[in-house]
Amino acid sequence: MESAVIAFSGGVDSTFLLKVARLSGIRTLAVTALSPSMPEEEFRDAREIAGMIGIPHLIIETAEIESPDFARNPVDRCFYCKDELFWKLKEIGLSEHYRFVLDGSNLDDMDDWRPGRRAALKHGVRSPLIEAGFRKGDIRRFSRALGLPTWDKAASPCLSSRFPYGEPITLDGLKQVGEAERFLKSLGFGELRVRHHRETARIELKEDEIPQMLKSETRRAVVEKLKSLGYKFISLDLGGFRSGNLNG
């Protein structure tokens, strides 16, 4: 490929792609989009990982929340976010003389609801992990072999995914969700989601962590904190955590 701009989130897939580009000697620029939809800890991870791999890293700001098409939260919400991102990456590539724009999509993404893929195709973005036939399990296995700290990292989609389709996405709502999830993680909970249903926060935890939440001290602390963030009702989903739970 000679040279490429890589959409870099600091997650499992884009980190592996960045490392492979580095090992291949491709002239590469990692670009991370900073927006209210991105959890703060993910931004910090992206910056640290790009530095560790030794790839030039550019931070840009995206304003998808200002787009009415995105903010009204239709079922193809992700298209509008990725449309803006890939347009900006393509502009960077043209101005800085990079031949390609790449993303970290893998074959498993083809089996899920991914409106962002339409934006990638629209802008001519290539997905080398799909082209090479890699699935998430392959990426984790090779990431571990390469010593990448992300090999067992949990998925962390943008905070907008915590809003049921049709529920408007607002800056205040994104802040509520972000702060609520940071607080729960500070209590030692692992992979989780706080689903935003207006005045109600619906907490999804791994099934083996549900008993910890039901302890009186923990439960009281969570209720107090989330109510201080503006939620009136705090519920625990007894079905447990499931990625993409709002897609169905």
Image (cartoon, rainbow, N blue to C red):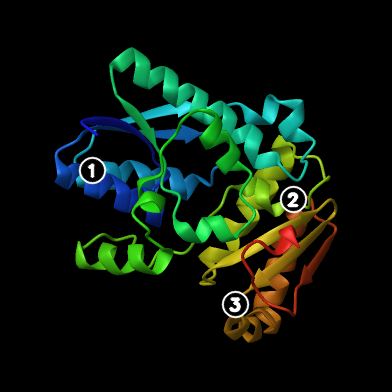
| Residue linked to disc 1 | 21
Mark with earlier residue (3, 2):
2
Left or right? Give the position of 72 relative to 81. right
Residue type at tag 1: Ala
Location of residue 140 with respect to 213 vertically, above or below: above
Left or right? Give the position of 148 relative to 106. left
Image point 69% across, 48% down: which residue? 176
Left or right? Give the position of 199 relative to 104. right
The answer to which image quadrant residue 133 occupies is: bottom left
Q: Is residue 36 visible?
A: no
The answer to which image quadrant residue 64 occupies is: top right
Mark with earlier residue (1, 3):
1
- Name the image quarter holding the N terminus: top left
Q: CA distance from mark 3 to mark 2?
A: 19 Å
The answer to which image quadrant residue 25 occupies is: top left
Residue type at tag 2: Phe
Residue 123 on image: x %, y %: 50, 28
